[in-house]
Amino acid sequence: MFKHNLVVVLVVLLMASNWAIGQTSRNEQLPSGAAKQKAEDACLACHEGRIIVQQRLTKADWTKEVDKMIRWGAVVDPKDREELIDYFSSAIPADQPAYVPPRSTVKTKPKH
């Protein structure tokens, strides 16, 4: 019985820590802008912000991407569609420098 309870507690703690890490990184990664909160609400329910910010798309491509995500189930009020496209087009444009992922702060043991 003790072993079972310990396993349950460990699983719950692992899930909680993963959720907390995900919530922090998801909210911190989208660029500021008028529709940031709407983008977080619509997009971060399914994936991390990193998936979005590494894109380098034109307005036409962002339009296709937003429409595809809506078809795939992203909850976007139809009146917010154009605002999201404008947000992504201006905050993460095609001519922006390549995405550089953040470095991990976890120290690893040097290889010998």
Image: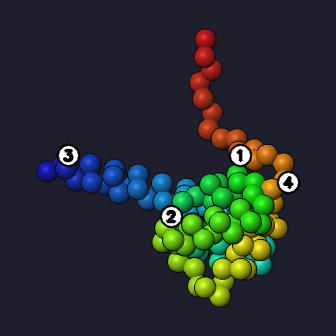
Q: Residue furthest left?
A: 1
Q: Position of residue 74 (x, y in %)?
A: 53, 72
Q: Disc 3 and disc 4: Cα gap in Å?
A: 55 Å
**Can I make out residue 24 in this image?**
no
In the rendered image, residue 5, in percent from the top left (x then y), is placed at: 22, 53
Foreground: 29 or 99? 99
Residue placed at 65% from the left, 88% from the top? 79
Q: CA distance from mark 4 to mark 2?
A: 26 Å
In the current view of this chain or complex, which residue is farthest to the bottom? 79
Residue 13 image offset from top left, x and y in percent: 39, 55
In the structure shown, which secondary structural element does the residue marked by tag 4 occupy? loop
Q: Nearer the viewer, mark 1 or mark 3?
A: 1
The image position of residue 95, as x and y in percent, is 85, 54
* Amino acid under disc 3: Lys
Label 2 to label 3, Cα distance in Å?
A: 34 Å
Q: Which residue is mark 3?
A: 3
Asked if marks 2 and 3 touch (Cβ < 8 Å), the reply is no
- What mark, if any, has residue 46 been given in the picture? 2
Mark number for residue 95?
A: 4
